[in-house]
Image (cartoon, rainbow, N blue to C red):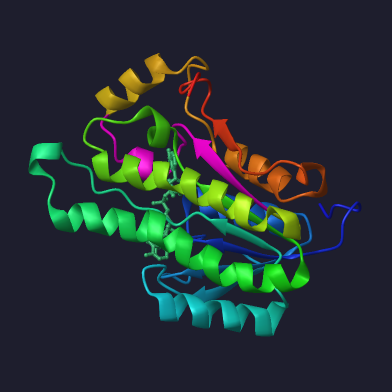
Amino acid sequence: MQNPSRPPRTVVVTGATRGIGRSIAERFVAAGDRVATLSRGSDVPDGVLAVPGDVTDSAAVDAGFTAIEEQLGPVDVLVANAGITRDGLLMRMSDADFDAVIDVNLAGAFRCARRASKGMIKQRSGRIVLISSVVGLFGGPGQVNYAASKAGLVGVARSITRELGGRGITANVVAPGYIRTAMTDELSETLQKTARASIPAGRFAEPEEVAGVVEFLAGPDAAYITGAVIPVDGGLGMGH
Ligand code: NDP
C-alpha cells in the first residue's frame, strides 16, 4: 500500500529475479515507489523495470543506471542485494571461487554504490542499503570467500557514511541469518536441522521479513540511522 507520509522514490534493487531481492522489490512497488532492478535475468515482479546488468561489469552497471535514470528519474535508493556463494573448505578453495564471490558480493555492491552516489550527491539525499549476512561477522566453515565479501560490506557502508553522511546520504548494512530462499534450499535437510537448532528464534525467516527492514531503512523514520549493521537473524549472531 502506498505510504502517504512520503512521495514515491526511484529505487534500484540488484538481483530482484528471486529470493530476498525479489521480495524487497515487491515491497517497494507495494509502497508506491518506482522500482528497477539490475539483473542478469528478466523474470522480475510485476511493476519492476528490468534492466540487464551484471554487477561484475562496471560498464554494464553504469549503462544500467543511466537507463534507469532516463526512464524513472534520479535514483533515491540503492539496495545492493545481488549475491552468490561458492562454498568450499579453505585448503581446497580455488582462486576462481574466491574471486568470483568477492567480485559479485563486494565489488558488485561497490560498483553500484559508486554509480548511485553520483546522483545522490547532486540531490543531497540518498539511501544505500547493502545486503550482507550474519556470516560476515560470525564466520562460517567453508565460507572464507563469502564471509570476507560480506564483512567487507560493513567497511564499505561505514566509509560511505563518513564520506557522504553530511550530504543527506545514509549507508547501512542488513545482515540476514537463514532466510528461506533458493540459497538455503540448497542446504541438506541435516544441515538445515542443525542450523535451526542454533537459532534462538528456532526457525528460518521468510524473505519478506528482510524486505520490511530494508524498506524501513530507506524511509523517513530512518534518516538518522547510518553506518549501522542491522541483524535480521532470529538472534543467531547476537553479540557481534
Ligand atoms: P538468490 O540466489 O535466491 O538470489 C540472488 C540474486 O542475485 C538473483 O536475483 C541473481 O540473479 C542475482 N545475481 C547473482 N549474481 C549476479 C550478478 N553478477 N549480477 C546481477 N545479479 C546477480 O539469493 P538470496 O535471495 O538468498 O540472497 C540475496 C542476498 O541476500 C545475497 O546477497 C545473499 O548473500 C544474502 N543473504 C542470503 C541469505 C539466505 O539465507 N538466503 C542469508 C544472508 C544473506 P540471476 O538470476 O542473474 O542469477
**Magenta span covers which residues?**
170-188
Q: Residue at x 69, y 69 (%)?
A: 121
Residue 173: x %, y % from top left: 55, 43
42 is higher (above) or lower (below) than 238: below
Q: Is residue 73 left or right of residue 42?
A: right
Residue 103: x %, y % from top left: 33, 60
Residue 135: x %, y % from top left: 38, 34
12 is higher (above) or lower (below) than 105: below
Q: Is residue 181 left or right of residue 103?
A: right
Q: Residue furthest right?
A: 4
Can I make out residue 179 in this image?
Answer: yes
Residue 211: x %, y % from top left: 62, 45
Q: Residue at x 74, y 60 (%)?
A: 167
On whether residue 178 falls in the magenta region, the answer is yes
Q: Is residue 219 left or right of residue 238?
A: right
Q: Residue at x 33, y 26 (%)?
A: 192
Can I make out residue 45 in this image?
Answer: no
